[in-house]
Amino acid sequence: MSPAVSPPPESDPPDRWQLWFDGCAWPNPGRLGLGALIVAPDGRRIELSQAGSRHGCNNEAELDALRMALERAWAEGARRLQVTGDSDVVLRHLNGDRRATVEPLCSQLSAVATTLAGFEQVELRWVPRHRNRDADRLSRAALGLPDKPAPVPGRGRPRRRRGVQVV
């Protein structure tokens, strides 16, 4: 299976759509929450938040969320996409790194790669979780979970000292 990714354009084409995706499993493995934000070239926002139809792990949720979002983007008329997510395993595999392949995910990865191949141009980007907040919020909302504050680089957890509670 060859990667369904073309190099990023030198400048943003006026017909390029933005897609952010995220998935969660609660507990992990458990129920799946799928979330995505699609932004049309004219700025119109489409928020997707849906509970998965099965139980699985967080990587399965990420793949289901991406596939759901790709299908919706296609139905809305998107043909050129910038796809952004925080799933290292999914994005590394789809960008051609077969070392990132997790055997139980192969059929899902193949299905997503096939869906991606239908688009004229796709750029896949990884971002840290704190830069994928909208999609994360939507995936958690699908399961009735509250927003989860994402860690911000450089801001560590407060240290606990023996006998001292940090609040």
Image: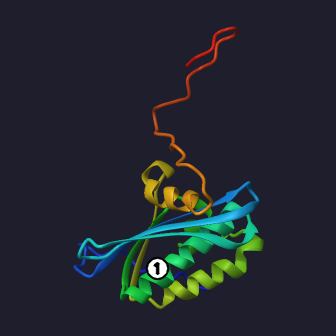
* Of 46 and 57, the residue lying toward us: 46
Q: Amino acid at mark 1?
A: Val
Q: Which residue is mark 1?
A: 5
Q: Quadrant of residue 55?
A: bottom right
* Of 105 and 5, the residue lying toward us: 105
Extreme residue in the top direction: 163
Quadrant for the N terminus, please. Answer: bottom right
Where's residue 157, x and y in %? Answer: 56, 28
- At 51% from the left edge and 40% from the top edge, which residue is drawn? 151
* Of 49 and 1, the residue lying toward us: 49
Quadrant for the C terminus, please. Answer: top right
Q: In screen coordinates, is 77 left or right of 68?
A: left
Where's residue 60, x and y in %? Answer: 68, 69
* Of 10 and 39, the residue lying toward us: 39
**41 w.r.t. 156: above or below:** below
- At 64% from the left edge and 78% from the top edge, which residue is drawn? 109
**105 w.r.t. 145: above or below:** below
**153 w.r.t. 146: above or below:** above
Q: In screen coordinates, is 162 left or right of 36?
A: right
- At 49% from the left edge and 51% from the top edge, which residue is drawn? 128
**Residue 32 visible, this orientation:** yes
Q: Quadrant of residue 106?
A: bottom right
Figure label count: 1
Mark 1 surroundings: few (<14), some (14-19) or many (≥20) residues within 10 A: some
Callout 1: SS: loop
Where's residue 54, x and y in %? Answer: 73, 73
- At 45% from the left edge and 53% from the top edge, which residue is drawn? 133
